[in-house]
Amino acid sequence: MWKNYFLNAIAATGAIILIMGSSGFSSNQAHTVTDIQKNSTLASIWDLDQENYSGNMNMTVYRSPSCGCCHQWIDHAKKQGFQITDVKTDKMEAIKKQYKIPANLASCHTAIIDNYVMEGHIPATDIKRFLKQKPNSLGLIVPGMPSGSPGMESSNKQPFEVLTLGKNGSTQVFKSYENY
């Protein structure tokens, strides 16, 4: 439990800290926050809130009632302070069509916040950064279900990109995740 508190308290500083006999570390060695994150069994890298945002935190998430990873992504968003209205529906294809999600970029859940669409396993810090910028676009997309992304955590981490979806259907990279 102390690791979660400690990680949140120092994450933004990038501080080097001293760990005295903690499991997974040698005694009396300095370690970075990244070292602790990689060795921590108590916290996900995605749990660290690295983006200050004071705007609307109310998000509606549409998902299939049978999808477990969607629920895990919702938990991730809640940990970042989002208030979630969880709408379970068997009409996900119609939801994606309504919000102009191209089929080749679709994922398992679709979230709506401030009239923007957030498709798939987007890190909550990226959503906050996007909302602060208020771009003239439809929203953000993480196509598919990349292993290691929020809600899809595993030791097998695939590189993935968060894409901005333009109103004309075009995309551009908002953020890339290679080594996380």
Image (cartoon, grey):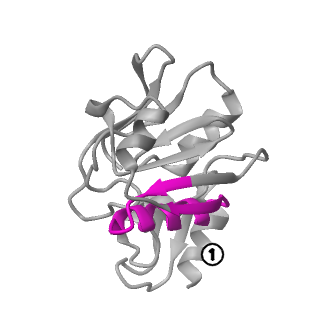
Residue 179 sits in which quadrant? top left
Q: Where is 146 relative to 165, above or below?
A: below
Pinpoint residue 111: horizontal percent, then vertical percent: 53, 48
> Between residues 136 and 29, which one lies in front from this camera angle?
136
Q: Position of residue 3 (x, y in %)?
A: 54, 78
The furthest residue to the right: 54
Q: Residues within 10 Å of mark 1 (few under 14, many from 20)?
A: few
Please name the residue shown 57% across and 47% down the image.
125
Image label count: 1
Residue 78 sits inside the magenta stretch: yes
Q: Is residue 81 magenta?
A: yes
Question: Which residues, given as a range, are shown in magenta?
Answer: 61-87
Does 43 appear above or below 139?
A: below
Name the residue at 63% across, 52% down: 59
Res. 114 image quadrant: top right
Identify whether 58 is placed above or below 66: above
Going by the numbered disc 1, the residue's amino acid type is Tyr
Nearer to the camera, 95 or 38: 95
Q: Secondary structure at mark 1?
A: helix
Left or right of 108 on screen, residue 15:
right
Residue farthest toward the left in the current orientation of the protein: 156
Left or right position of 176 against 79: left
Relative to 117, is 159 on the left or the right?
left
| Residue 97 pos. (x, y %) | 41, 34
Quarter in which the N terminus is drawn: bottom right
Q: Tell me which residue sits at (47%, 58%) in the image.
A: 46
Q: Mark 1 sits on what residue?
A: 5
* Residue 9 place in picture, x, y as percent: 67, 66
Q: Who's the residue at 33% across and 65% down the image? A: 67
